[in-house]
Amino acid sequence: MTENQGTYGKISRKQFLRLMTGSVCALGFGGLFNPGAEGSAPAGAPARAARLGFVRPEKSPWFSGLDGGMVRCELCPRQCELDRSQRSLCRVRENRDGEGHTLAYGNPVLIQEDPVERKPFFHVMPGSRALSISTAGCNLHCRFCEVWDMALVRPEEVHAYDLPPEAVIAHALAARVRSVSYGFGEPVVFYEYMSDVAHLARKAGLLNLVHTAGYIRPEPLKKLCTVLDAANVDLKSFDPAFYRNVVGGELEPVLTSLRIIREAGVHLEITQVVIPTLNDDMPIIRGMCQWIVKELGPDVPLHFARFYPLYKLSALPRTPVSTLSQARDTAINAGLRHVYVSRVTGHEGENTFCSGCGKIVIQRLGFFVDRVELENGACGHCGRRVPGLWS
């Protein structure tokens, strides 16, 4: 018997068929508009061809001038200081003749429709679809990056689209999605593009969702929060050494970002990919969960996602289901009310339980939402309020 069989592998034929339907849909969405090679956009999408290189370098307000024609990027905690023609560590910000520019504006390498559960957002419009966009570049260097061939490259090394903000919104409205999601890669590095799209999305009645590592300075984050509806932040570990050695950053700026998002009233969810031998220490996970309860509140949804071997950690095994279950139990015992297990289809941790009566109010199988028993954001059984964006 394999690890995925047993308790969490016992699904009915009806559930299996629904799962297969959801998987086919997910694959269809995933391939909608992703320029892995040169070609045209699909039917209904803007008629633009993907090509190598960035489209239009845009001057960015998130730079300050220094002596000798140097500039300093003010977006993320690195605050890269760049000489003329020099690029930042994220590869998409550059000093051009003494002025800071973004090379990611209107230049997405990915634009596709997905179930909102794939972001993952489990407390935002269950069963709805989001239009996801991302560009090249990232300001971290995770050794377990899942999109390294998109995020950890220079923009001239990948095919991308010339897609200004207005075209993104036109595509979203034509596709009849409920939200625009900035993620897959790291949206902090295409901040200016994301901000302009988000303002137009809000005017068009669309929700703005972001999935980010949260490695951003307070000022730009606070400004972004004025147009954000929901954020899922990767809290990759609660161990500063893990951040330095495996992620290539510092923990404290991420904790600051989490506080800012929560204080701004933006709906917040948190994700941690649990990696065997590296961040699966239960005492550290317990400390993280206790911090979340104290600093952010017990209603913040927390997702424990399964690690799969890839990029520079391909020699490690995938996360045992038992480890994910133990992490979930640890979080619940620490006081968190909505804790999920991701990437283990059929696990009870895919479902949303009412923190009052304990009954299932949203039942899921993978990305497929089987049933929702909420009435105006409250449990359909006992009436207790469930935090989230439901309408």
Image (tube, helix red, strand yellow):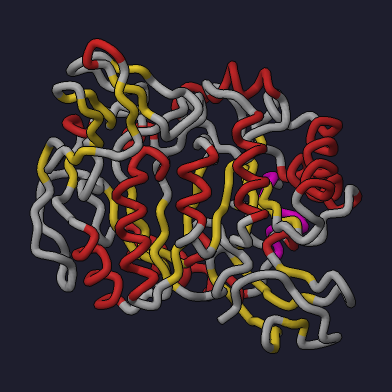
Examine the structure image and report whether residue 7 is included in the region drawn in magenta. yes
Where residue 179 sits in the image (x, y, percent)? 42, 69
Q: Can residue 314 be seen in this view?
A: no
> Residue drawn at (68%, 75%), measured in percent from left and top?
362
Relative vertical location of residue 324 with respect to residue 342 in this rendering, above or below: above
Examine the structure image and report whether residue 140 is included in the region drawn in magenta. no
Quadrant in which the C terminus appears: bottom right
Numbered-mark total: 0
Viewer-proximal residue among 331 and 186: 186
> Residue drawn at (56%, 74%), measured in percent from left and top?
126
**Picture quarter containing residue 7?**
bottom right
Image side of residue 390 versus residue 101, left or right: right
Image side of residue 291 versus residue 198, left or right: right
Q: Which residue lies furthest to the top in this view?
A: 68
> Residue drawn at (22%, 16%), measured in percent from left and top?
69
Q: Can residue 328 be seen in this view?
A: yes
Where residue 185 sits in the image (x, y, percent)? 39, 42
Relative vertical location of residue 326 with respect to residue 165 in this rendering, above or below: above
Where residue 11 sits in the image (x, y, percent)? 67, 68
Provide the residue span drawn in magenta: 2-10
